[in-house]
Amino acid sequence: MGNYFGRDPRNDILILGLDDAGKTALLSTLKLGKILTFSGTHYETIDVNGVSLTCLDLSGRNKERPMIHLSTGTARGFVHVIDSTDAARLDEALDELVKFVLLEKKTLGTVVMVLANKQDIPGALTALEVEDALKRKYKFSSTSPLAHTVFVRPCSVLAKEGIHEAFGEFVNLLDLKRCGKAKPGLLSLVTEDQNGGNFGRLGVEAQKESLALAKVKAVLKNPFCFRISKAC
Ligand SMILES: Nc1nc2c(ncn2[C@@H]2O[C@H](COP(=O)(O)OP(=O)(O)OP(=O)(O)O)[C@@H](O)[C@H]2O)c(=O)[nH]1
Ligand SMILES: [Mg+2]
């Protein structure tokens, strides 16, 4: 596993979220292609499109929470995993994101990806619902050059849907941020032609799949635009 404190900290990423959100499952799937779950804090180095990210998976269990304050200072990016089937704790999950990341001065200038996970389960909140709840909690600014760049994506770690695309966008944004070219504020899922969040116009093939997974695919077909070139 190597020595976390001896690593190159330039691409440090923190994976946050409440217990059972799917953080460890996500990281093990990205690293090994299969789900492992345990509740301790651990880290892995993963490769995303040729970019190496050192991801620290901080357990959502209470005794580990003080670790968050120790780790936020060096992180260039945050991945906040939400259990989209746990509507009762959505508020609590977003409160953590606001408290530990968005209101934390030392995290300014970072990229924050919120993953609305477990979209394979019928009835899961959509990414748009998660995004709307986040907008109600926190006033995003697109004017401060130091602000966070935040975006929400749907995924299912279990079905391996959406995670590689989301991490691809995440590293693109890290790159843009490094060059000072990433737009600050919330990059909304709703584009002009999707006004109202209607992801409903799906083809016959999509209708055969579970509704939630079909929605993940529909969103992925219509990514909001921040395709970039690597050069600054
Ligand atoms: N159906 C479904 N289950 C998932 C998904 N992702 C994770 N899980 C399950 O959710 C449970 C919790 O996953 P973990 O990865 O252990 O959660 P965690 O966020 O690391 O939890 P803590 O370490 O306690 O903070 C496990 O049983 C996973 O198999 C998903 O996309 N869909
Ligand atoms: Mg875990």
Image: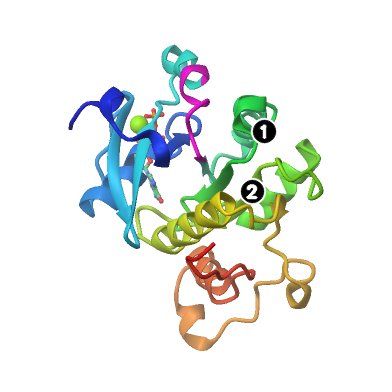
Q: In this view, does 86 lie to the left or right of 132?
A: left
Q: Position of residue 147 (x, y in %)?
A: 71, 41
Q: Is residue 218 above or below residue 144?
A: below
Residue 72 belongs to magenta span? yes
Instruction: Name the residue at 48% across, 34% down.
Output: 75
SS type, badge 1: helix
Q: In which quarter of the image is ligand 1?
A: top left
Quadrant location of the C terminus? bottom right
Q: Position of residue 148 (x, y in %)?
A: 66, 42
Instruction: Name the residue at 71% across, 71% down.
Output: 198
Which residue does the numbered mark 1 point to in the structure image?
102
Q: Is residue 146 left or right of residue 1?
A: right
Residue 65 belongs to magenta span? no
Q: Which range of residues does the magenta coloring cover?
A: 69-77
Which of marks 2 and 1 precedes in the sequence? 1
Instruction: Name the residue at 54% across, 50% down.
Output: 178
Residue 126 showing in the rendered view: no
Which residue does the numbered mark 2 point to in the structure image?
150
**What is the three-letter code of the residue carrying label 1?**
Leu
Residue 183 showing in the rendered view: yes
